[in-house]
């Protein structure tokens, strides 16, 4: 994605690569992940605290590099960012001012990765449910990314890909119908 977008916009690729590598580290420390649809601000804050406990043992310069990268994901989550410690909020504000496009790209990368994972599940395991579920949740955000990020609509969320996803979702809405509850015995 970064290589494709580099023809349209100059990005801090090192920051984005670090963010991609460590943004889920808190989940690993907590040994749990919360599904996207159920995630709350408090879950993000707990993951940040777990990240900070682990990476806080590094020397100051190293910690600062990883801290900034980890906090990039909070730039577009102002409610969660508001619940962070003061120093982390300060970094998030600074990133919003100096790396706003990178924050948008990171968000788009995360959403696009959800789609790619779900597409893989559909292609290899014929799991239409997960692809329909992910597309139903992520298409609006990918549309917004295409509007805001230079090159995203031309290289990633192209009209052809978007159209295919719209048709897939229309053809597979039935897999998203709620399962009726069984009567209690």
Image (tube, helix red, strand yellow):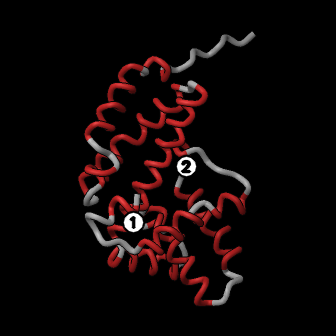
Q: Where residue 122 sits: x, y (%)? A: 53, 29
Which quadrant does the C terminus fall into?
top right
Which quadrant does the N terminus fall into?
bottom left
Q: Tag count in the figure?
A: 2
* SS state under label 1: helix
Q: Nearer the viewer, residue 183 or 62?
A: 62
Which residue corresponds to mark 2? 39
Q: Is residue 40 above or below residue 52?
A: above
Q: Residue at x 52, y 57 (%)?
A: 41
Left or right, residue 120 beside residue 95: right
Q: Residues within 10 Å of mark 1 (few under 14, many from 20)?
A: many
Any mark on residue 103, and which? 1
Q: Residue at x 29, y 44 (%)?
A: 158
Q: Where residue 115 sits: x, y (%)? A: 46, 41
Closer to viewer: mark 2 or mark 1: 1
Left or right, residue 144 beside residue 32: left
The earlier-in-sequence mark between 2 and 1 is 2
The alpha-carbon separation of the residues under discs 2 and 1 comes to: 19 Å
Q: Residue at x 48, y 62 (%)?
A: 80
């Amino acid at each position: 994605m970064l290589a494709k977008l580099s023809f349209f916009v100059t990005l801090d690729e090192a920051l984005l690569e670090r963010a991609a590598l460590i943004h889920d580290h808190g989940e690993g420390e907590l040994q749990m992940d919360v599904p996207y649809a159920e995630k709350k601000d408090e879950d993000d804050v707990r993951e940040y605290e777990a990240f900070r406990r682990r990476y806080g043992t590094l020397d100051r310069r190293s910690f600062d590099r990883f801290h900034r990268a980890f906090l990039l994901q909070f730039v577009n989550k102002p409610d969660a960012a508001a619940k962070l410690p003061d120093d982390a909020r300060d970094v998030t504000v600074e990133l919003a001012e100096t790396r706003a496009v990178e924050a948008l790209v990171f968000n788009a990368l995360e959403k696009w990765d959800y789609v790619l994972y779900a597409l893989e599940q559909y292609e290899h395991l014929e799991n239409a449910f997960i692809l329909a579920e992910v597309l139903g949740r992520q298409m609006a955000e990918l549309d917004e990314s295409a509007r805001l990020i230079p090159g995203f609509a031309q290289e990633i969320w192209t009209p052809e890909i978007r159209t295919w996803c719209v048709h897939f979702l229309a053809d597979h809405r039935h897999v998203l119908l709620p399962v009726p509850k069984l009567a209690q015995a």
